[in-house]
Amino acid sequence: MSLFSFCKWMAEWTAEKMLIPVFEFQEGLFPPFSNPAGSIADWLGTDGGITTLAWLYAVNIAFAVGMTNLIIVIHLERKIAARIQDRRGPMLSLRSFRELGEDLAGNAPSWKFKDNYSGIGILQNLADGIKAITKELIVPAKADKFLFTMGPIIFISSSV
């Protein structure tokens, strides 16, 4: 079974069991001149509506798989780079506060694994995403704003 055939089955089930009854119920609630759903229930019953819904599911599933793969690959890259550079990697990043306290108390920080901390370092990707979203764009006063913002876009799109 391919991804699209699974998504088409899922779209048929969703349209038949969930969406069409909701839109038909909504059509009965509102007067004809103010029906916000219009003829969506009729369209979802056609092959075009099912195919559109199946493509929507397939694209979202592929996007979710791709983003999950991206998170795992970034996490592995950080762990490998930390191993090569002989430093603490993302697996020990949450323990740094305890180690800082041990260091300030005059004790040698313990870098050994004491428990299973698997998966904790993936939170570093979440922190980097929040940092990137909340970053402020600073444009120099004498710079052309359009060219200043388009420069990185042009550079990355030409290299991809």
Image (cartoon, grey):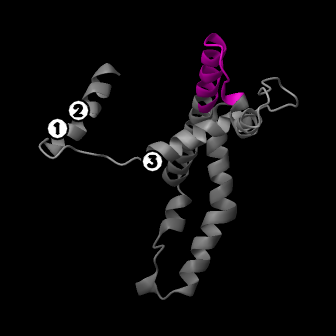
What stretch of residues is rendered in magenta? 71-91
Q: Are marks 1 and 2 in contact (CB under 8 Å)?
A: yes
Label at residue 151: 2
- Side of 57 where 135 appears, left or right: left
- Name the secondary structure under disc 1: helix
- Name the secondary structure under disc 2: helix
Residue identifier under label 1: 147
Q: Quadrant of the N terminus?
A: top right
Q: CA distance from mark 1 to mark 2?
A: 6 Å
Residue sitting at 45 percent across and 47 percent down? 133
Image x and y of residue 33, in percent: 41, 86
Q: As rendered, which of 127 and 23 lies closer to the eye?
A: 127
**Looking at the magenta stretch, what is its main secondary structure?**
helix
Q: Quadrant of the C terminus?
A: top left
Q: Does 63 appear above or below 30?
A: above
Q: Amino acid at mark 1?
A: Leu
Residue identifier under label 3: 133
Q: Amino acid at mark 3?
A: Ile
